[in-house]
Amino acid sequence: MAIHYQCRHCGKHVGRLDQNGLTAEQLGFHELSAEERQTMIEYDKQGEIHVKTICEDCHEALERNPDYYALHSLIQ
C-alpha cells in the first residue's frame, strides 16, 4: 500500500511512502480532527492512500498573501 501526498492547492506531487504497516499515529493522522481526515485523506480502489497537503511553493505564497486562504485554489 502506497501513500501519495499531493498539494491541495496546485496539484503538485509532493511525495510518496511505500512502507507497509504504518499506523495512523506514525503518519500523524491521529492529530487530525474527523473533519480534517475526511477532507484530507482519500482511499482508492487499490487500497492506496491519497493525502492532500501543501507544497513549499503554495505555503510560501500563503505566508506572503494571507488573503489567499479564502481561495479554494491558488491557481486562478
Image (tube, rainbow, N blue to C red):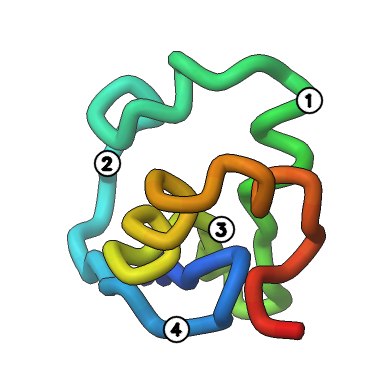
Question: Circle 1 sits in a helix, a strand or a loop, which is it?
Answer: helix
What amino acid is at disc 1? Glu
Residue that carries the numbered disc 4 in the rendered image: 12
- Disc nearer the start of the sequence (1/3): 1
Task: Say the numbered circle drawn on residue 22.
Answer: 2
Looking at the rendered image, the quarter that the N terminus falls into is bottom left
- Foreground mark, 4 or 2? 4
Q: Where, by quadrant of the figure, is residue 8 drawn?
A: bottom right
**Residue drawn where x is 33% and y is 57% of the image:** 60
Marks 1 and 3, how far apart in space? Answer: 13 Å
| 8 or 59, nearer to the observer | 59
**Residue drawn where x is 79% and y is 46% of the image:** 70
- Disc nearer the start of the sequence (4/3): 4
| 57 or 63, nearer to the observer | 63
**Residue drawn where x is 68% and y is 72% of the image:** 44
On the picture, is 38 further left or further right than 66?
right
Task: Say the numbered circle drawn on residue 35.
Answer: 1
The vertical placement of 47 against 10, above or below, is above
On the picture, is 67 further left or further right than 30?
right
Question: Circle 3 sits in a helix, a strand or a loop, which is it?
Answer: strand
Q: Is residue 3 visible?
A: no
Q: Residues within 10 Å of mark 4 (few under 14, many from 20)?
A: some
- Disc nearer the start of the sequence (1/4): 4
**Residue drawn where x is 40% and y is 45% of the image:** 63
